[in-house]
Image (spheres, rainbow, N blue to C red):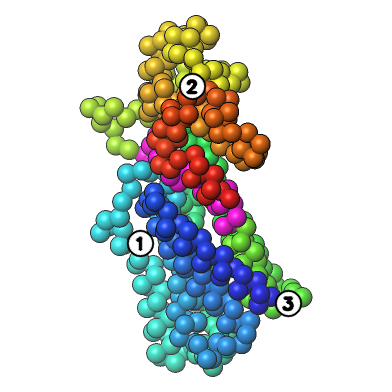
Amino acid sequence: MDYLFVICLAILGFFMVSILSRKANQLSDRIFTFWLFLVALAEVTFFLSSQNLFHDFHWIYEFACASHVLHGTMFYFYILSLVDPNFGFSKKHLLHLIPFAVYMGYKTTTKSLGLVDCLGEGGCSHSDNIYAIISVYMKFLIILAYVVIGYLMILKVQKNKSFAKGNPYRLKWISSIGNGVMVLLAVVFLIKLLGIFGVHFVIDQVMLINIIVSVFVISFVYIYSKYAYIFANPMSVNLALPVEKDTTSVHISEEENPYDEQFQQICDFIETKEVYKDGDLTLRKLSDMIDVPEHIISQAINRSANRSYSDFINSYRIDYFIQLIDRKAHEDKTLLYLAFDCGFNSKSSFNRVFKQFHEITPTEYIKSRT
């Protein structure tokens, strides 16, 4: 199993470098990279444990184990950065380091008082010492609290139709990461619970958890590679988080939006009939098709998706192009052919619109996928 931890570390290192070297590097990318770094630290502890090198590198081991508390915090910050484009770090966010400081204070105090000796006991995670056990559950509860808060944000986003329509791929990624983290926590908790009741496993309980976490991490970064292109694409709407009411603001929540029904009708028609493939799909033409006045269509798209009519239609075309690339359609067809198939009238307009949405050219995007 040692190879699993080494492979996992190599994959994490590759993804950290690739994310940081990307041209369109956003706050969510930097948060995600730091989170991957913390995961890599955890993998280091797994490797040291598997090699019985805890005594030789006990300071690294203990520091990395303590950093596990920050996984919940980084999950919360990462989800927040994905659902709120206005999110930025400020001094108030330093308050989220208090649980980590409390945890470190507890560990330092118990160790200095001689109540627990991780080095002598072969690692606190293996210990039957009551103070070490409290430390483990403190860590778990802190992580769980932040994961639950982050997951509640995800549920709020999933119920928001406007966010889903404007950011379908971003929503899929957010949902995937949320569900995955919740399942991982549930599995770890179940293993710990079974251990309390005396259930014996084929291998050491801690090693089993380490293996499960490593497999999850590899799956996690693989799924990320499938959705990586969305992070160069700014969000269409920002309706995920509660906002204070402001009568002077142009922001209208889902509940206050008088065009929600029309917007749903427009989206359903466009997706069902795939009319975005029509390169001459003007606002008037769409109006005639669905028998809705032009100004209503324009207002509905603007209020619900926070986009102009042309940008809204082009978003469907770009999404369809992404689907074609995922199906390897570019391997036997030219980009110009695919551009026309998506509804663009020229290669120049296709390149311009694609770069507007993803900040890279179609050719650069294809290279990044391969």
Q: Are marks 1 and 3 in contact (CB under 8 Å)?
A: no
Q: Residue furthest right?
A: 202
- The span shown in magenta is 220-242
Q: Residue at x 64, y 40 (%)?
A: 331
Label 3: how many residues lie within 10 Å, few (<14), some (14-19) or many (20+)?
Answer: few
Q: Which circle marks residue 96 in the picture? A: 1
Examine the rendering and report whether any part of residue 261 can be seen.
no
Q: Residues within 10 Å of mark 2 (few under 14, many from 20)?
A: some
Q: CA distance from mark 1 to mark 3?
A: 36 Å
Between circles 1 and 2, the one closer to the viewer is 2
Q: Position of residue 171 (x, y in %)?
A: 51, 41
- Residue 203: numbered disc: 3
User: Mark 2 or 3 closer to N-term?
Assistant: 3
Give the secondary structure at mark 3. Answer: loop
Q: Please state which of residues 327 and 273 is positioned toward the viewer in this rendering.
A: 327
* Mark seen at residue 345: 2
* Spot occupied by residue 256 in the image (x, y as percentages of width and height): 38, 24
The residue under the point 51% across, 32% down is 318
Query: Type of residue at label 3?
Result: Ile
Query: Does the magenta run of residues contain 286?
Result: no
Asked whether disc 1 touches disc 2, contact meaning CB atoms under 8 Å apart, the reply is no
